[in-house]
Amino acid sequence: MLSFRHRHRPETDIDLTPLMDVIFILLIFFIVASAFAVRGLDIDLPAARSSHALSGRVVEVRLNKDGSFLCDGVPVERGFLRFRLQDIVRSFRQSPGQLVLKADPEAPVEALVYVVDEVRMLGGEKLMVATSNPEDHKGTQ
């Protein structure tokens, strides 16, 4: 006898839902990752013979030519700098780190003194001032 039953063929449509899920997860990943991208300014640091490289956790405070401030690459107004520095000094009590001031050579001295004074008043014992090696400046003078 012959069997006339129809065989059930599975559907061959491709389900795109997992593909869309992966695409959206990648999109979210790249959006979040771009928020952590390092953006910085090149500052010509003054030379010092006693300069050495730092290691470990370093928080950077930049003083620009115009007297503006950046804390870890984020612009901070002068009025809010004390609060930002207070958070940094408090976090160093839990996990030690180094606070580094990178000042442009043409930055106002008054702003430099202001940062040093604020760190000392908040209990920050060590404030490193970033410099460059004098050999780096020999060819540029």
Image: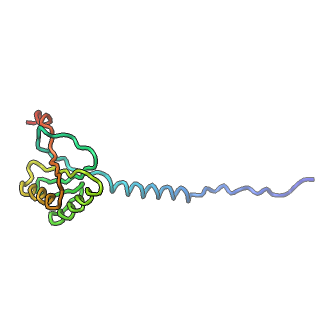
Quarter of the image for residue 111 reads: bottom left
Quarter of the image for residue 139 reads: top left
Which quadrant, please, contains the C terminus?
Answer: top left
Please state which of residues 12 and 81 is positioned toward the viewer in this rendering: 81
Residue 124 horizontal/vertical position (percent): 18, 56
Please state which of residues 110 and 123 is positioned toward the viewer in this rendering: 123
| Residue drawn at 8 percent across, 50 percent down | 106
Residue 5 horizontal/vertical position (percent): 84, 58
Please state which of residues 24 and 126 is positioned toward the viewer in this rendering: 126
Q: Seen in the image, is 83 located left or right of residue 7?
A: left
Residue 138 horizontal/vertical position (percent): 10, 34
| Residue drawn at 63 percent across, 57 percent down | 13
| Residue drawn at 9 percent across, 48 percent down | 105
Q: How many marks are shown on the rendered structure? A: 0
- For the view shown, which residue lies furthest in the right direction? 1
Q: Is residue 83 above or below residue 56?
A: below
| Residue drawn at 33 percent across, 57 percent down | 35
Query: Which coloring applies here?
Result: rainbow
Q: Seen in the image, is 112 located left or right of residue 4?
A: left
Residue 29 horizontal/vertical position (percent): 42, 55
